[in-house]
C-alpha cells in the first residue's frame, strides 16, 4: 500500500493540475499574466474572457463578451419576485446563494460541453451582478432597475444599485477589485466548486457551493470582517490599544495572513495604493491612521501581512458601500475563476475522494 500522509487543512497537498492560475515565487499569475500588469492594463471584462476562454481577447472577442454580458443581464421576472419575498434582514451572501440556485431554473444556455460551459459562465457572471444590485434596490425601498447596455461590468453594478452612473473613480476602483478578486488557483471556494464538478454535477451547483465556501470569514467574508473590526475604532490610539491586546491574547485579525503568501499578498499592495489615494481625495486620512495602527504591529512584530481583504474592506467603506455588499462583490468577480476551474475539471475529471483517519469508537456490537 502506498505511504499515506495526513495534512490538516490539506496544507501543502497538491490536489490537481491547473492552467488557470498560479502563485509563482510569491507572484499571482492569471494564465501566465502577472496580476500587477492585469491590474494596470486590463478591465474586468478582459480578465473574465482570459479566465473563461483561455487568453486575453482581441477587440472583436472583447466586444462579443461585453454583448453577451449585456444580453444575459436581465433577471427573470420570477426571480425578481422571489427576491422580493426574502426577509429584509437576510444576509446578502445568503440571498445570493439562494438566488443563484434559483436562477439556474431559468438558465437560457444548454449543453454540457466546454463551449456551453463558457456561455453559461458568462450568463452566471451577468446574472450575479444583477441579483446583487436588485437586492440592494429592494433593501433601499426601490424597485430593481433595468440594466443599461454598454456600461462596463463595474459601472453596471453601481448603476443598477444606485440608479445613477458612477463617477470615473468609483468605476475604476470597483473594476480593479473585480480584477484582483477574479481568481486564485485551488483556494477553498474554488476547490469546493471543483469537488462538486468532479461528481459530474452541474455548473450552477458548483457556483452555489463556491458561494457557500466563500462566505466564511476565513475566506471571502474577511473583507466584511476586517471592516467590522476597523469600524469599532474612532481614533488611531484606540486601534493601537486594541491590537496590542488582541495579539497578547492570540486573537485572529481578519484581513491578515494567507495559506500561500507568507511574505505578503501582492493584491493587497496594489489595492492599498489606490486606497491611500481614495482616502486622500475624500479627506478621510483618519481612516488610514487607524488602518496603519492595526497593520504596523501585524507586519513588524508578527510578520503576518495584510491579504487583499484588508484594504478592500476600507476601500468599499470609503466608497459608501454597505458592509453586507463586500463579499457579494467578491462573488461577482470570482464566479469567473470558479467557472474556469469547472471547465478545466470537467475536461479532465477524476472524482475527489480523499481519506480520513478514524478517531471514533472501536468496533463494538449493537446491544440487544
Ligand atoms: N491573525 C493572527 N494570527 C494569524 C493570522 C491572523 N489573521 N493568520 C495567521 N496567524 C497565525 C496563526 O495563528 C498561526 O500561529 P501559530 O503558528 O502561533 O499557531 C500562524 O500565523 C500560521 O497560521 P495558520 O493558521 O497556520 O495559517 P493557515 O494557512 O492555516 O490560514 C488563513 C490562513 C488565511 C485562514 C489565516 O491566516 C486567517 O485566518 N486569516 C484571517 C482571515 C482572513 O483574512 N482570510 C482571508 C484570506 S485571503 C483572501 C480570501 O480568501 O478572501
Image (cartoon, rainbow, N blue to C red):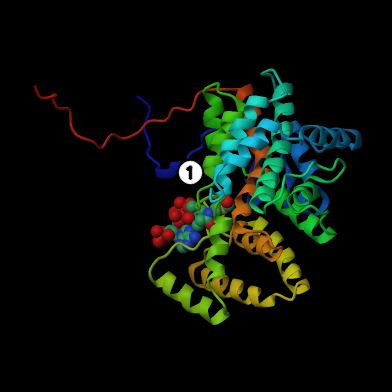
Instruction: Name, please, the residue furthest toward the bottom.
Output: 237
- Indicate whether 287 appears above or below 254: below
In the depicted view, which residue is nearer to us: 165 or 47? 165
Task: Name the side, left or right, on which 70 lies relative to 102.
Answer: right
- Indicate whether 312 appears above or below 44: below
Residue 57 at x, y percent in the picture: 84, 36
Query: Is the distance from the Cβ of mark 1 to the nearest ligand 1 atom less than 8 Å?
Result: no
What residue is rendered at 38% in x and 69% in y? 249
What residue is rendered at 64% in x and 73% in y? 287
Task: Name the side, left or right, on which 256 lies relative to 311.
Answer: left
What residue is rendered at 78% in x and 72% in y? 281
Which residue carries the number 1 mark? 12
Residue 261 at x, y percent in the picture: 57, 54
Task: Name the side, left or right, on which 153 lies relative to 342.
Answer: right
Instruction: Name, please, the residue furthest toward the right.
Output: 59
Q: How many marks?
A: 1
| Rendered image quadrant of residue 109 | top right
- Indicate whether 121 appears above or below 109: below
Residue 183 in view:
no
- Indicate whether 231 appears above or below 366: below
In the depicted view, which residue is nearer to us: 172 or 363? 172
In the depicted view, which residue is nearer to us: 178 or 356? 178
Task: Name the side, left or right, on which 219 lies relative to 332.
Answer: left
Residue 310 in view:
yes
Label 1 residue SS: loop
Residue 15 at x, y percent in the picture: 51, 34
Residue 318 at x, y percent in the picture: 69, 66
Instruction: Tell me if mark 1 has few (under 14), some (14-19) or many (20+) residues whose alpha carbon lies within 10 angstroms of its own.
Output: few
Amino acid at each position: 500500500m502506498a505511504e499515506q500522509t495526513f495534512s490538516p487543512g490539506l496544507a501543502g497537498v497538491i490536489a490537481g493540475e491547473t492552467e488557470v492560475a498560479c502563485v509563482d515565487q510569491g507572484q499571482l499569475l492569471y494564465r501566465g499574466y502577472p496580476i500587477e500588469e492585469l491590474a494596470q492594463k486590463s478591465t474586468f471584462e478582459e480578465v473574465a474572457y482570459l479566465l473563461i476562454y483561455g487568453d486575453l481577447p482581441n477587440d472583436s472577442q472583447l466586444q462579443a463578451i461585453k454583448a453577451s454580458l449585456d444580453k444575459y443581464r436581465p433577471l427573470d421576472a420570477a426571480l425578481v419576485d422571489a427576491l422580493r419575498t426574502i426577509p429584509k434582514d437576510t444576509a446578502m451572501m445568503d440571498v445570493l446563494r439562494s438566488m443563484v440556485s434559483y436562477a439556474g431554473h431559468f438558465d437560457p444556455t444548454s449543453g454540457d460541453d466546454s463551449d456551453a460551459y463558457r456561455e453559461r459562465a458568462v450568463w452566471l457572471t451577468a446574472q450575479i451582478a444583477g441579483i446583487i444590485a436588485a437586492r440592494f434596490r429592494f433593501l433601499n425601498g426601490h424597485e430593481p432597475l433595468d440594466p443599461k447596455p454598454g456600461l462596463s461590468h463595474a459601472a453596471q453594478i453601481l448603476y443598477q444599485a444606485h440608479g445613477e452612473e458612477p463617477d470615473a473613480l468609483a468605476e475604476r476602483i470597483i473594476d480593479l477589485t473585480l480584477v484582483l478578486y477574479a481568481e486564485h488557483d485551488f483556494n477553498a471556494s474554488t476547490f469546493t466548486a471543483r469537488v462538486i464538478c468532479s461528481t459530474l454535477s452541474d455548473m450552477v451547483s458548483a457556483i452555489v457551493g463556491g458561494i457557500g465556501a466563500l462566505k466564511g470569514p476565513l475566506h471571502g467574508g474577511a473583507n466584511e470582517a476586517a471592516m467590522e473590526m476597523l469600524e469599532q475604532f474612532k481614533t488611531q490610539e484606540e486601534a493601537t490599544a486594541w491590537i496590542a491586546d488582541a495579539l497578547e491574547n492570540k486573537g485572529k485579525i481578519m484581513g491578515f495572513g494567507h495559506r500561500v503568501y507568507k511574505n505578503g499578498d501582492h493584491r493587497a499592495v496594489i489595492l492599498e495604493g489606490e486606497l491611500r489615494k481614495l482616502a486622500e481625495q475624500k479627506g478621510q486620512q483618519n481612516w488610514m491612521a487607524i488602518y496603519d495602527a492595526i497593520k504596523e504591529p501585524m507586519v513588524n512584530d508578527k510578520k503576518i501581512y495584510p491579504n487583499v481583504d484588508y484594504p478592500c474592506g476600507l476601500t468599499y467603506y470609503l466608497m459608501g458601500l454597505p458592509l453586507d455588499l463586500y463579499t457579494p462583490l467578491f462573488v461577482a468577480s470570482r464566479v469567473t475563476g470558479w467557472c474556469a476551474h469547472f471547465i478545466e475539471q470537467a475536461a479532465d475529471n477524476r472524482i475527489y475522494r480523499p481519506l480520513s483517519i478514524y478517531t471514533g469508537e472501536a468496533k463494538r456490537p449493537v446491544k440487544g
